[in-house]
Image (cartoon, rainbow, N blue to C red):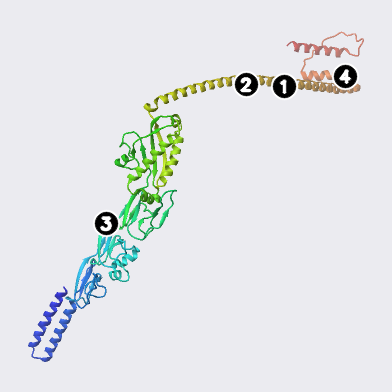
């Protein structure tokens, strides 16, 4: 387009100038010549205009009017001839004349989601001796360096070769003549796992982890150091430069290793696939006890790798499961065989929990040296009919005999207790009857005392009433005479008891007493009535 503007300007200026020569008027001719010059200048100026689209970047190459590049350099940072480090941003740009400059547009670098860009520089300072990647810098500084190539090649002191930093998802305006970008997937750490990184660049590692006596120390690396990093990556997605770092995915889930004679391939656990389940099925363990019995033992060992110990496991056993399983297999078999040498067969069978706890402590201590945590040791079947059948039958018969003796003893104890219980119950009944009799005696005595007291009270009451009545009669008799007093009392009784009176004729000679005939007759009538009432 710039060449077209220049060509159009030259043609128009030439046509205007040719027209000017045909005009007879000098002023008109001068005006057209001035216009031809202005058109030529405008065409030349327009030919320096360059446009860069919104999704592109402009690459500038100087062809003339500049000093040559220094040997070994690819991009120009001081307006030397050659490809310029600076790029043109989207928009209109002036003063890039044809012949002197070539401007080429390239698409922006677009890093999609869940992707990262691995960057390699074609120019810059040489890498440090022994290093194959540029030193790692902060993400903000790295972004400035790749979007400002001149800064990368000058004050930023960028290094030539693979960069340890990566491009995260987004669009970048970088110079493709300086940087090449390769797009790869982000590193995903699945659940129940961690990622252990081994840095392929940096200074020598300095972190020394504690170890057991006699073991060589495990040297881990910090950020910026070369070697296995001490900090593992937790589950998630990470922009890891898989060329600058070696990534080892280590499972942190609890895993069960079975040492059994059962058919392989039947166990699939904790999300393991069939091949992994088969790898966790190991040949049964055969032990020999101190009394010469040899028999198989069904053992299950549970282990896990803590996230903080994953770098130690990778440093000592590598990232593959095979060395770990081989180490665990050797340790478990040796410890179970050594423990069995110190006990008899029956004791081994009867003391299963003791063997489990003892083996757990010993296996745990040994595997901890490699960063592996043993969470459980379980003993299943011990021996079989072929190896321990006769011994177990003898033990069973002996146990039955012992149980029968214990049963007889318990029955004897029960009989004695029943006898004691009957005696106690009889004594309790006797005591109950004695207590009842004692209470009845006390009640009878109290009833006797009550009756005596009531009789005395009644006698005293009668005596008092009789005395009072006698005193009253005496007072009345003194006043009205004994006969009249008796008559009054008789009439009172007759009234209270509603006695019908029909006087009988009595013959009385009146001798020897103070009673008159009428009184005697009345008394007789009363006596008859009283006799009648009693008969009824």
Relative to 443, say whether 290 is above or below. Answer: below
4 vs 3, front mark: 3
Mark on residue 443? 1
The residue identified by callout 2 is: 424
CA distance for labels 3 and 2? 93 Å
Mark 3 surroundings: few (<14), some (14-19) or many (≥20) residues within 10 A:
some
Mark 4 element type: helix
Question: Front-most of 58 and 288?
Answer: 288
Left or right of residue 50: residue 386: right
3 vs 2, front mark: 3
Mark 2 surroundings: few (<14), some (14-19) or many (≥20) residues within 10 A:
few
The residue identified by callout 3 is: 184
Is label 1 in contact with label 2 (beta carbons under 8 Å)?
no
The residue identified by callout 4 is: 484
1 vs 3, front mark: 3
Of pointers 1 and 2, the one earlier in the residue sequence: 2
Of pointers 3 and 2, the one earlier in the residue sequence: 3
Of pointers 4 and 1, the one earlier in the residue sequence: 1
Is label 4 in contact with label 2 (beta carbons under 8 Å)?
no
The image quarter in which residue 53 lies: bottom left
Mark 1 surroundings: few (<14), some (14-19) or many (≥20) residues within 10 A:
few
Is label 4 in contact with label 1 (beta carbons under 8 Å)?
no
CA distance for labels 1 and 3? 110 Å
Kindly identify the residue that appears in the image at 33 percent across and 56 percent down. 238
CA distance for labels 4 and 1? 52 Å
The image quarter in which residue 304 lies: top left
4 vs 1, front mark: 1
1 vs 2, front mark: 2
């Amino acid at each position: 387009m710039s060449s077209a503007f220049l060509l159009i300007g030259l043609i128009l200026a030439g046509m205007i100038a040719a027209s000017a020569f045909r005009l007879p008027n000098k002023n008109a001719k001068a005006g057209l010549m001035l216009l031809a010059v202005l058109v030529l200048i405008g065409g030349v100026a327009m030919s320096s205009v360059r446009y860069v689209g919104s999704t592109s970047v402009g690459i500038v190459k100087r062809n003339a009017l500049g000093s040559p590049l220094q040997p070994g350099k690819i991009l120009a940072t001081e307006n030397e001839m050659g490809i310029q480090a600076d790029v043109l941003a989207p928009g209109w740009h002036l003063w890039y004349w044809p012949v002197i400059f070539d401007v080429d547009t390239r698409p922006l670098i677009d890093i999609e989601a869940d992707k990262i860009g691995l960057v390699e520089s074609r120019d810059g300072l040489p890498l440090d001796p022994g290093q194959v990647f540029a030193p790692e810098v902060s993400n903000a500084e790295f972004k400035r360096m790749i979007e400002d190539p001149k800064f990368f090649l000058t004050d930023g002191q960028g290094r030539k070769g693979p960069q340890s930093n990566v491009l995260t998802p987004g669009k970048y305006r970088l110079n493709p003549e300086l940087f090449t970008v390769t797009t790869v997937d982000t590193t995903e750490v699945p659940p129940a796992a961690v990622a252990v990184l081994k840095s392929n660049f940096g200074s020598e590692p300095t972190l020394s982890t504690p170890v057991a006596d006699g073991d060589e120390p495990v040297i881990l690396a910090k950020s910026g150091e070369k070697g296995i990093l001490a900090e593992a990556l937790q589950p998630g997605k990470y922009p890891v430069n898989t060329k600058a770092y070696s990534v080892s995915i280590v499972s942190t889930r609890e895993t069960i290793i079975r040492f059994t004679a059962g058919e392989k391939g039947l166990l699939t656990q904790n999300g393991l696939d069939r091949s992994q389940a088969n790898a966790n099925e190991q040949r049964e363990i055969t032990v020999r006890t101190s009394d010469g019995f040899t028999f198989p033992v069904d053992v299950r060992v549970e282990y896990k790798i803590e996230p903080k110990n994953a770098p130690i496991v990778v440093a000592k056993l590598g990232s593959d499961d095979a060395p770990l399983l081989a180490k665990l297999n050797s340790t478990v078999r040796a410890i179970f065989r050594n423990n069995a040498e110190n006990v008899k067969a029956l004791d081994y069978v009867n003391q299963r929990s003791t063997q489990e706890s003892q083996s757990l402590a010993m296996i745990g201590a040994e595997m901890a040296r490699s960063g592996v945590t043993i969470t459980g040791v379980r003993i299943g079947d011990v021996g079989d009919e072929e190896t321990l059948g006769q011994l177990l039958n003898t033990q069973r018969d002996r146990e039955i005999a012992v149980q029968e003796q214990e049963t007889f003893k318990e029955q004897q104890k029960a009989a004695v207790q029943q006898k004691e219980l009957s005696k106690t119950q009889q004594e309790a009944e006797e005591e109950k009857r004695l207590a009842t009799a004692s209470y009845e005696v006390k009640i009878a005595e109290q009833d006797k005392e009550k009756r005596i007291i009531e009789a005395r009270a009644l006698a005293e009451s009668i005596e008092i009433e009789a005395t009072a009545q006698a005193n009253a009669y005496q007072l009345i008799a003194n006043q009205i005479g004994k006969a009249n007093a008796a008559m009054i009392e008789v009439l009172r009784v007759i009234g209270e008891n509603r006695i019908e009176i029909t006087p009988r004729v009595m013959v009385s000679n009146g001798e020897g007493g103070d009673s008159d005939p009428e009184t005697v007759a009345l008394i007789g009538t009363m006596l008859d009535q009283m006799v009648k009432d009693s008969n009824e």
